[in-house]
């Protein structure tokens, strides 16, 4: 359904767009925000990272081996897991700080791609990187946000509500009974962004993927169909990711004798 | 009834003692000496080395929740998770009677917890700890926030629990209260626990 209206950008167009960052720089300078250096680094990072991924994707799209698709997918999962736990106020000690996020994202990413690409879209071959990798990226990007918010709520609320959680444990509650209030709070926080996004999509904002497809010349109705599919995949992935991470996190916050183990958390150095 | 063998509580030398059914063992010592961590260890709220037996059965033979239904810890500063006291009781049998015996009104069971005074909340926590008849009560300064009248009511309720054959381990800073309720006392000082008469 691609139309012939796609207009390729030149490097000169990109350079002209980059000049807009000067507005940020001037504002920072005028109001003495001290952000000039940070802005420059962030703008350079964004450009270099996106250009690099563009060339990597071009290379991988040209390959016919599923190993390239799976390999890059795994790298994406590992980076997403790092981001999911990188800014936690309190994080799990040792390997679990990273393991919980990566295990959850691997599980959710795999399920999302299998269902979204394998079952719904059904390309031939099944590992078509042009479909698998962008969809995996969108699922991971949103799920890591849900996981990050859920785990932050879980660990902070467990610390804050320690007295009431231990009161329930002392009365003979199991770990999940004792943490039920905190678990509910955490799941709600994790799912809130995607619920808000779904409610605002189409009226307040046009999603990036749909906009990109329209700019590339795809029929808007066809672009919408893809966007609806992706949004549901993201919603399901976020809910599943938050659920798995919170249950796993709650289990790690307690031990086999159903004791609250806040000693398994440490303050993040960041 | 409850026997601790070489319990390695943080900050204390290994401690062993036993408390029988119907007996109140007092625990006294300066603030920060380890009284609360000892009670928490007995309730299996913190991992500690050593062995604890209830009526001859070792703690590890019970799941954590099963153990804590029998060996009940009531904290000096009780925690709450619901809006009203009633939400914290899984059973209603004997609830009204226990509430009134402690000088509270049954209508307070349905009032917001924020409307209760510190002393009223402490008595509600005492009711919560006793209502489902655990074998052993580990009471951490249960009358710390109470006036003389409410303290006497709380002591009568504790004495009644002893008559029913329950064992009580009581942390208290009040020597007179220890004499009224306990037969023996465990004095904790300088990282050591020493058993003596109350």
Image: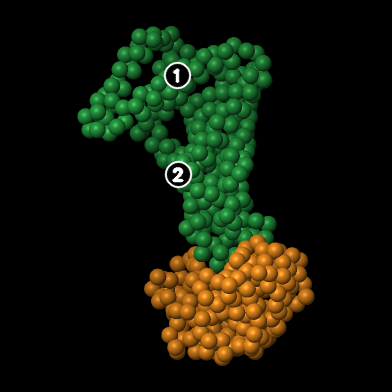
Chain colours: A green, B orange
Residue B80 visible in the shown view:
yes
Task: Return the disc, 2 or 1, that comes first in the chain's sequence.
Answer: 1
Residue drawn at x 59%, y 76% as measured from the top left = B188
Which residue is identified by label 1?
A: A48
> Up-down: is B158 above or below A48?
below
Is B14 on the left-hand or right-hand side of A250? right
Tag 2 subunit: A
Quarter holding residue A38: top left
Q: Which mark is residue A73?
A: none
Q: Which residue lies furthest to the bottom in this view?
A: B180
Q: Is mark 2 on a helix, strand or loop?
A: helix
User: x, y (%) of residue B41?
Assistant: 64, 68
Residue A213 visible in the shown view:
no
Q: Is mark 1 on a helix, strand or loop?
A: helix
User: x, y (%) of residue A126?
Assistant: 65, 21
Closer to the camera in the image, A125 or A229: A125
User: x, y (%) of residue B17?
Assistant: 70, 77
> Up-down: is A117 above or below B116?
above
Q: How many marks?
A: 2
Marks 2 and 1 belong to one chain: yes
- Structural distance between the alpha carbons of marks 2 and 1: 32 Å
Is B157 on the left-hand or right-hand side of A199? right
User: x, y (%) of residue A26?
Assistant: 24, 25
Residue drawn at x 63%, y 32% as measured from the top left = A110
Which residue is identified by label 2?
A: A192
> Up-down: is B42 above or below A246?
below
Q: How crowded is mark 1: few (under 14 residues within 10 Å), some or many (20 or more)?
A: few
Tag 1 subunit: A
Closer to the camera in the image, B192 or A50: B192
């Amino acid at each position: 359904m691609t139309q012939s209206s796609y207009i390729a950008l030149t490097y000169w167009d990109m350079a002209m767009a980059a000049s807009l960052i000067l507005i940020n720089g001037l504002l920072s300078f005028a109001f003495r925000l001290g952000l000039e250096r940070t802005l420059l680094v962030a703008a350079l990072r964004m450009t270099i990272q996106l250009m690099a991924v563009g060339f990597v994707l071009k290379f991988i799209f040209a390959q016919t081996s599923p190993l390239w698709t799976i390999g890059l997918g795994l790298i994406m999962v590992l980076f997403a897991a790092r981001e999911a736990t990188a800014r936690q106020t309190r994080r799990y000690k040792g390997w679990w700080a990273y393991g919980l996020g990566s295990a959850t994202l691997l599980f959710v990413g795999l399920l999302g791609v299998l269902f979204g690409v394998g079952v719904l879209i059904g390309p031939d071959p099944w590992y078509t990187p042009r479909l698998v990798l962008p969809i995996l990226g969108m699922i991971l990007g949103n799920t890591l946000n849900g996981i990050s918010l859920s785990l932050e709520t879980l660990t902070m609320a467990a610390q804050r509500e320690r007295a009431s959680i231990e009161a329930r444990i002392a009365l003979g509650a199991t770990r999940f009974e004792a943490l039920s209030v905190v678990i509910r709070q955490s799941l709600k926080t994790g799912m809130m962004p995607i619920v808000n996004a779904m409610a605002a999509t189409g009226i307040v904002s046009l999603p990036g993927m749909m906009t990109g497809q329209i700019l590339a010349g795809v029929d808007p109705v066809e672009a919408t169909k893809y966007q609806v599919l992706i949004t549901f995949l993201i919603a399901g992935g976020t809910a599943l990711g938050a659920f798995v991470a919170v249950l796993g996190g709650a289990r790690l916050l307690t031990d086999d004798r159903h004791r609250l183990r806040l000693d398994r958390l440490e303050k993040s150095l960041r | 009834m409850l026997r601790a063998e070489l319990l390695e509580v943080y900050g204390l030398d290994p401690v062993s003692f036993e408390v029988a059914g119907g007996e109140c063992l007092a625990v006294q010592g300066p603030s920060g000496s380890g009284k609360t961590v000892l009670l928490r260890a007995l309730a299996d709220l913190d991992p500690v080395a050593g062995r604890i037996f209830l009526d001859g059965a070792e703690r590890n033979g019970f799941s954590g929740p099963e153990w804590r239904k029998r060996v009940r810890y009531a904290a000096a500063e009780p925690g709450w998770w619901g809006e009203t006291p009633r939400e914290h009781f899984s059973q209603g049998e004997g609830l009204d009677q226990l509430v009134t015996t402690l000088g509270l009104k049954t209508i307070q069971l349905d009032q917001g917890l924020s409307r209760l005074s510190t002393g009223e909340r402490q008595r509600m926590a005492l009711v919560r700890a006793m209502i489902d008849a655990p074998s052993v009560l580990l009471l951490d300064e249960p009358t710390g926030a109470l006036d003389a009248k409410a303290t006497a009511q709380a002591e009568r309720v504790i004495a009644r629990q002893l008559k029913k054959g329950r064992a009580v381990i009581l942390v208290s800073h009040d020597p007179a209260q220890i004499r009224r309720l306990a037969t023996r006392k465990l004095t904790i000082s300088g990282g050591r626990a020493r058993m003596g008469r109350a």
